[in-house]
Amino acid sequence: MRRAFSRRQRKILQLVSGNQCAICGTHLKDFHADHKRPFSKGGDTLITNGQALCASCNLRKGDRMAEIQLRPWQSDATKKALGWLLGEDGGKHFLINAAPGSGKTICASVIAQKLIGHGSIERVIVIAPRKEVVRQWCDDFAKVTGRTMLKVTGADADMEGYGADLCATWAAIEGLLEGFQEVCDSTNTLVICDEHHHAAIEAAWGRGADGAFANAKHVIVLTGTPIRSDGQEPVWFAYDDAGQIDHPKDGTYTLTYGDAVDLGYCRPITFHRHEGNFSVTLPDGEAISVSGANDAELEGRLKNLQGLQQALEFYRLACTPKYTDKGRPDPDSYQGSMLEWAIAQLEDLRCDVPNAGGLVIAPSIEIAEYMAELIEILDDEKPILIHSQMANADQKIKAFRQNRKKWIVSVAMISEGVDIKRLRVLVYLPNSQTELSFRQAMGRVVRTLGPDDYSRAYVVMPTHRTFEQYARRVEQEMSPDQRDQRQTRSHKLCPICEEQCERSAKECPSCGYEFPGGQPRYKTCDQCDKQNPVNVEQCQFCGHSFKHDFEVNLNEALRVGAIVRGMDLDEEEVVEGEKYKRNISNDILRSGDENLIRLMQTIPPESWGRLKKLLDDNE
């Protein structure tokens, strides 16, 4: 194989690098196409083994492989893992329970490299939750070990690349179970199980993992959220009475989120609980008030309609899109007010981290598209939108990671293991309400850019009781100094030369980089016409409150529901509603109850079975 990269390969390396040196991050006016694993040591002249470097970094590197500077916890965890896996009194499984963003991938790759050097293993299999995470694993593994990995993804076990080491999604394990089993049976293999909570003993993936990797020489289990939302025990481990993974202390290394923040590995989080009061208009004109603190109060027969009560829950209303008369997303909606807060915070953060980005987690594709359009209206920049029905979603995530766009909107596509270090602001409006999902989402915005990264992560979420409980637990893990939101920062980091500059500096004194100025966002007081920052709750001139009701009609409230427009119906009720909808309609009309007649005209026929049951019960 030739030593020099071709002209086309060089262009691709330049494109992938974003025209920045892969080591120091300097803007590349000219660059060297470098072999990650030196050509003199068997490195291939391929894109996967190439990187764009500035001249000084390439000359310093020479024919040495880039050395990984481990964090103290990674060094400690590596020593403990090797002692457990190779010691006479040790075991087969080693557990690393470390906070998202703290560097579990690098740590596990170093352990693998040490085991290969020791001669204990010949091959490595990594199991990851998604295709995008598989790609990240392959990149990081190659940087640490110089070894390429064969990617196996999808239920049909599609393969990409080459290498004796393998990286597969959980779904691919089921698609090629006997193949992975044969690898473990025929060679000494290390299995690295990422995001271990996926592998419940009773779930298909758990059974697949248990069968395929029963004869693996060693297993390293990685997790930052060890408890599954459904309470099932993951494969290989059991839970103790306190609900924690039951594994010997000597075979476990734990680094909590609070520890990671105090050590500077993760950014502290500021939670903004976004309040909102909804006024829902019923067909008879009556308005029902709903907020995060006060549930809807229904009276009479309306009180017995479980589906209606469910549709009027605060969180469902918070996820209900609101459109203008022209059919465009309404900037004055609850979601619009959430985004105004988030956009203002991101503008401020970009003074410290010029390429800081924001993430919106939406509950559905419809709401994601709605939120993306709202961002474009409010911030005059079209965000990147990704969801499961989009082609090349992983490529769009990769592009966002490397560019300077402000926002990315996702439906369950940017979660566990997806590493976008520049994310700092999260707008949290998800479908899942489990603590597992909550903590995984927080992990997207806490990653640090380095020891001089003084920024905070900022989360905008509804005033939802469940989310607030989770947030309080996260806050309690941080030390009092880190929880103090009034903490001031006197310096900021230059993104070009990494020089610490005064916070008020307009340009870097070392390299001349001009820091972008913040763009304050204002709103006009309805009472005195004075301008106020968007994130104040009352006018700073006349004291007028900016809090207002978000008006929603019943049709809008029912549109975002459980099974049928908010009605949590069982099959018997659906069948009866279809079978007797004409009779039910006549019964309701004969009843003379104006509220029920108007409600009948609003809700779908599938729910009429429940109305009939209510009428029968009240006769």
Image (cartoon, grey):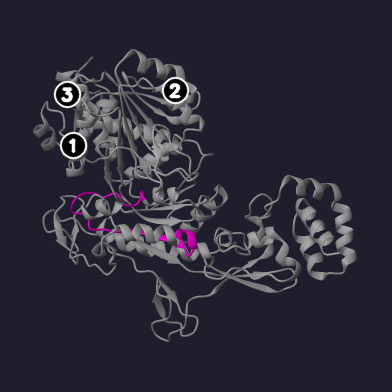
Q: Which of marks 1 and 2 is nearer the N terminus?
A: 1
Span colored in magenta: 443-467
Of pointers 3 and 2, the one earlier in the residue sequence: 3
Q: Which of marks 1 and 2 is in front?
A: 2
Reply yes or no: does residue 154 show up in magenta. no
Q: Label 3's element? A: loop
Q: How far apart are marks 3 and 2 (CA)?
A: 38 Å
Cβ atoms under marks 3 and 2 closer than 8 Å: no
> In this figure, which residue is indicated by the disc labeled 1?
30
Query: In the picture, which quadrant includes the N terminus?
Result: top left
Residue tagged 3: 38
Where in the figure is residue 321, as x and y percent of width and height?
58, 59
The residue located at (88%, 60%) in the rendering is: 587
**Quarter location, residue 477:** bottom left
Q: Residue 219 carries which label?
A: none
Question: Is 447 in the magenta?
Answer: yes
The amino acid type of the residue labelled 1 equals: Asp
Identify which residue is drawn at 26% across, 58% down: 455
Q: Is residue 594 above or below residue 162?
A: below
Task: Look at mark 2 in the image and give the residue it sits on.
Answer: 211
